[in-house]
Amino acid sequence: MNNSYGKNPGILYHPVENIARTEAYLPTECPQNHASNIMPLANGDLLCVWFGGTQEGIADISIYLSRLNYGESTWTTPVKLSEDATRSEQNPILFLAPDGKLWLLYTAQKSGNQNTSIVKYRISSDNGYTWGSINTLFDTSGTFIRQPIVVLDNGEWLIPIFYCKTAPGRKWIGDQDTSAVKISADNGMTWVEYQVPNSTGCVHMNVEKLTDGTLLALFRSRWADNIYVSHSNDNGRSWTQPVPTVLPNNNSSIQFTVLNNGHLALVFNNVNAKNCAERRASLYDEIEDDYEPMPQIAESEEAPKPELNGKTAFWGAPRAPMTLAISQDNGNTWPYIRNLEVGDGYCLTNNSKDKLNREYSYPSIKQTADGKIHITFTYFRQVIKYVCVTEDWVKDK
């Protein structure tokens, strides 16, 4: 990797302006690196997975894993965990099952079209050093994941999903995507699906258990307006209709976690598309895709029109700043907000080879028993950045 960030890849360091904050740029040889998820292990190690390759949506995109061993100061050289020459493999998540087995789940799509995606998985019995065979978990075309699995109080597993949908012959742009959860009562062998009502445009559903026993879900918005919220009081069987919160969203991913003291910590881009003068046609408008165009229609015939909800997905809103917020009342208010990274967030292109993209995006967040908050996110689509802070760091702004 041509390290253009002024620090050695993988090495932890303290920014000069605040020694309470630790950082690192994870090592990589790929031009593009995106969509990380971080996972603390019981032995104190930290694992991070993401996808890397030439450019999102192209078939050379694969899943990578790096490890920060407990007590060490360098993230390890990434290991490639997938390689399907026909599909772009994206959005990896890690799940440490109650039996100690570590699951890796990720999406696999044909070039440039998310409505062809299926979900793959593989399992490790030694904390991610070796992995079993790659298998298909969900084979319905258009199934996507992004957020972690939750173990419910009754022992069941819940995974949030969203469906990338489009009308026949129409390229996917995201304006018909909907959310659901799948629940397994037999350790991932079989799954039952429960839809989120009226969730069109609400994706990347992130579910966490609150201290009162209810489930809270926060969503990315395809409309680039606000973060949306939904609740469940019956272990994920039914959900309230998603409604907007006061927090903005730019049609980019978010993630939150419940801290050890019951507070919520959310990482997100504190911006929306309200004042955007420019936009992209779609996420994949720079690459060829595998969708089949509509057949030619005679002039006397009326072309079929897809059923839309009157809104259009907004692509290209700036993806910056990267912000950390704390809620002390189950997400009703977020009084403590501090930026992790600032910049112009330019993302009207996904081009990483020519270093044209300047986004901070797709954060992941977890807290360990020692109170440290571990965060990873995409830095300019060139590298994954790791940041470690505490709740007091946010409040001491």
Image: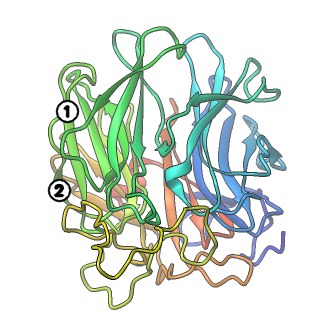
Numbered label tally: 2
Residue type beneath disc 2: Pro
Residue drawn at the location 40% of the way across and 54% of the way down: 254
Residue drawn at the location 80% of the way across and 49% of the way down: 78
User: Is residue 146 visible from the viewing direction of this image?
Assistant: no
Secondary element at image label 2? strand
The location of residue 255, given as percent across then percent down, is 41, 49
Quadrant assignment, res 103: top right
Q: Name the residue that disc number 1 marks.
A: 239
Secondary element at image label 1? loop
Residue drawn at the location 79% of the way across and 26% of the way down: 131
The location of residue 97, given as percent across then percent down, is 56, 18
Relative to 371, say whether 115 is above or below: below
Task: Give residue 7's mark.
Answer: none
Quadrant assignment, res 93: top right
Q: Earlier in the sequence, mark 2 or mark 1?
A: 1
Q: Is 260 left or right of 332, judged from the image as shown? A: right
Residue drawn at the location 59% of the way across and 63% of the way down: 112
Alpha carbon of mark 2 to alpha carbon of mark 1: how far? 15 Å
User: Is residue 121 visible from the viewing direction of this image?
Assistant: yes
Residue type beneath disc 1: Trp
Q: Are marks 2 and 1 in contact (CB under 8 Å)?
A: no
Q: Name the residue that disc number 2 marks.
A: 244
* Outermost residue to the bottom: 277
The location of residue 397, given as percent across then percent down, is 35, 65
Q: Which of marks 2 and 1 is in front?
A: 1
